[in-house]
Amino acid sequence: MTVCCSSGRARDGLALDKGVIAARLAALEQYLRLLDELGSLDFNSYVSDPRNYGAAERFLHLAIECIFDVGAHIIASLGLERPNRYADILPCLARAGVIGEGTASRLDSLAGFRNVLVHDYVRLDRNRVYEFARNRLDELRGFAREVAEFLGRYADA
């Protein structure tokens, strides 16, 4: 799928900057490694030390921000219709063939989770963050893998 004009610039004037995307994906992987460590703690150790659950909450927030930043950059660069909400970014990427529908579906709750981490942190369920760190990080890695695959195809287009 070619959405660029002959100059190689996206329709809205922004070039797809692989360096920006690579930096966000590298940061994402760093946050996921840190979350792996925190998710390997037993629940009592995790919840009894605010440094553990506070770090997990922050690293998860940053990981989610990386995903939405990458998505927004790709959407703008491809000249796709700009999403009105975070929740619209992943379905937009799936419709454009950047990520799979399954990935978009599995990550459907990220926008809401981001909003809780950022705005409703007082009611944040520490168990939910812990379970995410223990069981769902591979979903975020899957997003990164699919974006990297897209970038490889995009370079060939």
Image (cartoon, grey):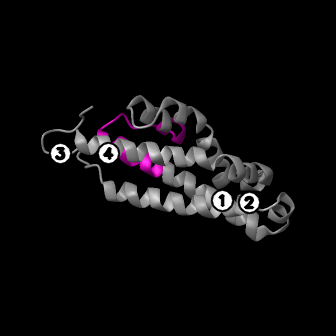
Residue at x 57% of width, y 32% of height: 105
The extreme left residue here reads 6
Amino acid residing under circle 3: Gly
Does the stretch in magenta take in 86?
Answer: yes
User: Which residue lies under the disc numbered 3?
Assistant: 8
Amino acid residing under circle 2: Ser
Q: Secondary structure at mark 1?
A: helix
What is the CA distance from the residue labelled 1 to the residue labelled 3?
A: 39 Å
User: Which residue lies under the disc numbered 2?
Assistant: 40
Q: Secondary structure at mark 2?
A: loop
Residue 152: image tag: 4
Residue 23, quarter of the rendered image: bottom left
User: Which residue lies under the disc numbered 1?
Assistant: 36
Amino acid residing under circle 1: Asp
Query: In the image, residue 49 lies at what x, y percent?
Result: 81, 69
What is the CA distance from the residue labelled 3 to the residue labelled 4?
A: 16 Å
Query: In the image, residue 58 lies at what x, y percent?
Result: 64, 62
Query: In the image, residue 27 lies at what x, y percent?
Result: 49, 62
- Which of pointers 3 and 4 lies earlier in the amino acid sequence? 3
Residue at x 27% of width, y 31% of height: 1
Crowding at dot 4, Cα within 10 Å, few <14 / some 14-19 / many 20+, comes out as few
Q: Secondary structure at mark 3?
A: loop
Crowding at dot 2, Cα within 10 Å, few <14 / some 14-19 / many 20+, comes out as few
Give the residues in magenta: 68-89
Q: Nearer the viewer, residue 119 or 93?
A: 93
Amino acid residing under circle 4: Gly
What is the CA distance from the residue labelled 1 to the residue labelled 2?
A: 6 Å
Label 3 close to label 4 by CB (< 8 Å): no
Label 1 close to label 2 by CB (< 8 Å): yes
What is the CA distance from the residue labelled 4 to the residue labelled 2?
A: 33 Å
